[in-house]
Amino acid sequence: MRLPSSPRRRFSAVLAVGILILVTGTGAFAASPVSNPQLSPAAPAVANDKTGPQFYSGLSVDVRDDVSGDVYASGQRITIDGNVTGDVIAAGQTIIINGNVDGNVRIAGQDVTINGDVSRSGTIFAANVDVTDTGSFGEDLVGAAGAIDITGAVGRDVEVSVGTLTIDGPVGGNLTYTSDTEASIAQDAVSGTVERIAPQTAPEPTLGERFVAWLLGLLYSLVALSIITVLTGWLLPRLLHRVTDQLVPRPWKALLVGFVASIAVPLVLLLALITVIGAPLALAGALVWITLTLATFVFGSYYIGRLLFRGNQHPVIKALVGGLILIVALHIPWLNIVVWLAMVFLGLGAQLLAIYDRRPWRRTPMTETLPQPR
């Protein structure tokens, strides 16, 4: 059996192990006794004479007695001191096997230590694996880990995907490992062949492939964002016109307001977030600020459309044409940075100025409300 050579698959396996540990650890905490769970060993789900499959779960699992059958264990720390005639299937953060196992071991964990003799094979996925000088495998050892240290004996083959590998004990068969670095292997430790598989990196895309990817991204943006601008121009034409009115006579004022607000508002929200009282208000303010920032694309599109069409064209036409120009500009390297900053600053400034003009505490001058003399 040959392990996948891609490091991406190796890291995916380690990530899956982490998720498994998290899930099993949560379940173990829920199943553990309320009083002093760290010190209370888990017991089998059904009390019996240790014959047949045994199931253990808890924050700290300690199997001290011999088991005639398989052992299934999950927890944060799992220690198996007794001898097991069947297999050991375990998932946890720290797993230590001190007893002898007549079958196989299937383990997923963070730190795995093998101090006992495993008569058959081991399949281990972990961050660190340590097979001490008192531990051994009668047949094969396969798996993936960040670091593997083998001081004990392995009867047949070792096939692993690993970051760093150290072998000081005897390996009766072949060694095949996938790693970025050369393994540290004691002289004559491996009886068979030693093969290192270098992880294959993805080839750099060609200029044509990059252009095709850029073109596909542009086409997707044209379709998706054009739908947004068309719907906004159709449903909210007055809002688009009122906000962009702040840009037509005085764009530099809106640009300055948007620039200052882009610096000041996130700082204020961050300061409010670290306080207990202001945290809910900061979260609500962050949602509003994100919404205003996302809306800058629509207002920027309509503003460009107003600059192009001086007549009474429909708002949908203005928003659509302006949006197409803005999308293309945002996909041109280097230019897209300037366009994006201008869009955000102008859009935020125009929205804030429009909100200020519509402030509820604004009073109407008395001269407008008094009746004119005849």
Image (tube, rainbow, N blue to C red):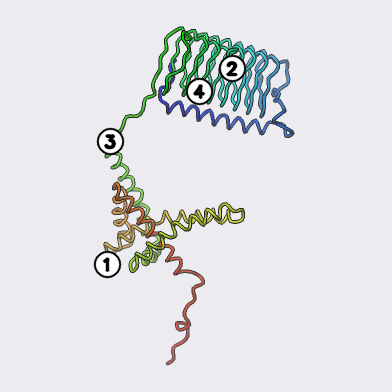
Quadrant, the C terminus:
bottom left
Q: Is any atom of residue 237 visible in this view?
A: no
Which residue is disc 2 drawn over?
Answer: 114
How many residues crowd mark 2 within 10 Å: few (<14), some (14–19), many (20+)? many
**Disc 1 versus disc 2: distance between alpha carbons?**
81 Å
Cα gap from disc 3 to disc 2, whole angstroms: 49 Å
Residue density around tag 3, few if under 14, some if 14–19, many if 20 or more, within 10 Å:
few
Q: Earlier in the sequence, mark 2 or mark 4?
A: 2
Instruction: Assign a secondary structure to mark 4.
Output: strand
Q: Is residue 241 above or below residue 17?
A: below
The amino acid type, in three-letter code, at marker 2 is Ile
Label 4 amino acid? Ala
The relative height of residue 353 versus residue 151 in the rendered view (above or below) is below
Nearest to the observer: residue 150 or residue 355: 150
Give coordinates of residue 198: x percent, y percent: 38, 21
Tell me, yes or no, whether the two marked residues, 1 and 4, touch with CB atoms within 8 Å: no
How dense is the environment of label 4, judged by Cα within 10 Å: few (below 14), some, or many (20 and up)? some
Task: Give the residue at x 57% y 29%.
Answer: 21
> Mark 4 = which residue?
147
**Res 85 quadrant in image:** top right
Alpha-carbon span between mark 1 and mark 4: 70 Å
The residue carrying mark 1 is 311
Q: Earlier in the sequence, mark 3 or mark 2?
A: 2
Q: Earlier in the sequence, mark 1 or mark 2?
A: 2
Q: Secondary structure at mark 2?
A: strand
Residue at mark 3: 209
